[in-house]
Amino acid sequence: MVERLYYSDAYIQSFTTQLIKQEKDEKGNVYAVLTETAFYPTGGGQPHDVGTLNDVPVINVEEIDGEVRHYIEKPLDGVDEVFGIINWQRRFDHMQQHLGQHILSACFEELFHIPTVSFHLGTEFVTIDLDIDQLTEEQIIEVECLANQVILENRSVETKWVTESELRQYPLRKVPTVQSDIRLVIIPELDYNGCGGTHPKTTGDVRAIQILNWERQKKKIRVQFVCGERVLTQFRAKHKIVSQLTQLLSAPEQDMVSAVNRLLDHEKDLQKSLEESRERLLNYEVTELLDNTNLQNGVPILSRVFQGRTIQELQKLVRLLTSKRNDINVFLVAENEDKLQFVFGRGAASEVSMNSIIRQTLPLVNGKGGGNDALAQGGGEAVITGQQLLNQVVELL
């Protein structure tokens, strides 16, 4: 078994050891196995460490069949002695987040008897899933306050290897899933938990915990939070955004919500006014179009080619036109770059089947569409012009 230096001292940042072997896995990835290592392999919700071995980047670390494999960008040159360096910023961040999770989960148990069922340590934030389907803001604030009080007290963090029979001596928050090599992480008078991850020596090293969000996931509540340096990173990012918004809105920070609400109300008024103007324009357009209705073999037909109109606008025009005149047959086409889109409709007194005409029209443009006898729409490639398509429709009629 490889000696795991991160268990004897999680603060080790570099080490010298011997190379046992280096091989390729079934995917052709090169990995090295060492007599001892300070690189933490992925496990228990904590991501792996990265760093270098003899200046060769370590890009992944996994435990497979009892050996810790250090996946490296290229093979180590014929050496027996290896000098390893841990990316300490990444490692310490993981230590802060992991212990922060222990503290936060213990505080949910302590205050409200809510157990944590899962944990994920991401690159930007951490999540825990709580075995409950509702959570109030007051509970969140109370838990966050207690967690930060535990950090402020700078309690020592103990680790202890125990046997399965010794577990009954401790008030465990969760029963370990392993029966041997059981490692307890202990925050006195708060948390006793089986865990194989890396953690700081004191709660003070976590620095701070900030809960960012919580939401229901199926029958659980997922809590999103950050610890340590990530709290400052979140604060800086949000402060920058708030500062920019205060300038854009010409309002102090404490009045920003009111300023945004006024802006949204103003936008709603503008949207309503714009929609009303569009409706008036459409009605003017409908009147103009109706004046250009033609008779083809005694059948009133209105056809028009537009540029850059959406199919939704065409549908609205057709409905307005057929509501104004019940014997009319309307054929509208829009030329939109390399596409043709069209809507055909009839008034209540017409017997022309628009669905039948659309089905015969679609092959002309390699198109798709459908509808019913009163209203049909479709679209396809602009292999012919809009006017040529309408000429074909008139022939069909």
Image (tube, rainbow, N blue to C red):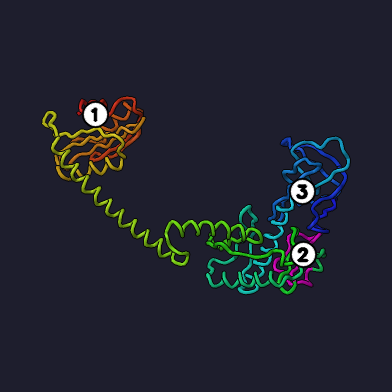
SS type, badge 1: helix
Which residue sits at x=20%, y=39%?
346
Q: Could you give the CA–CA distance between mark 3 and mark 1, rounded to whole angstroms?
A: 69 Å
Question: At which x and y percent is residue 267?
Answer: 34, 56
Which residue sits at x=25%, y=44%?
316
Q: Viewed as shown, does residue 220 lie left or right of 160?
A: left
Q: Are marks 3 and 2 in contact (CB under 8 Å)?
A: no
Report the amino acid beneath label 3: Glu
First in sequence: mark 1 vs mark 2:
2
For label 3, the residue is 63
Report the amino acid beneath label 1: Leu
- Give residue 281's quadrant in the image: top left
Is residue 182 inside the magenta stretch? yes
Q: Viewed as shown, does residue 346 lie left or right of 122?
A: left
**Which of the two discs, 1 and 2, sits closer to the camera?**
2
For label 1, the residue is 390
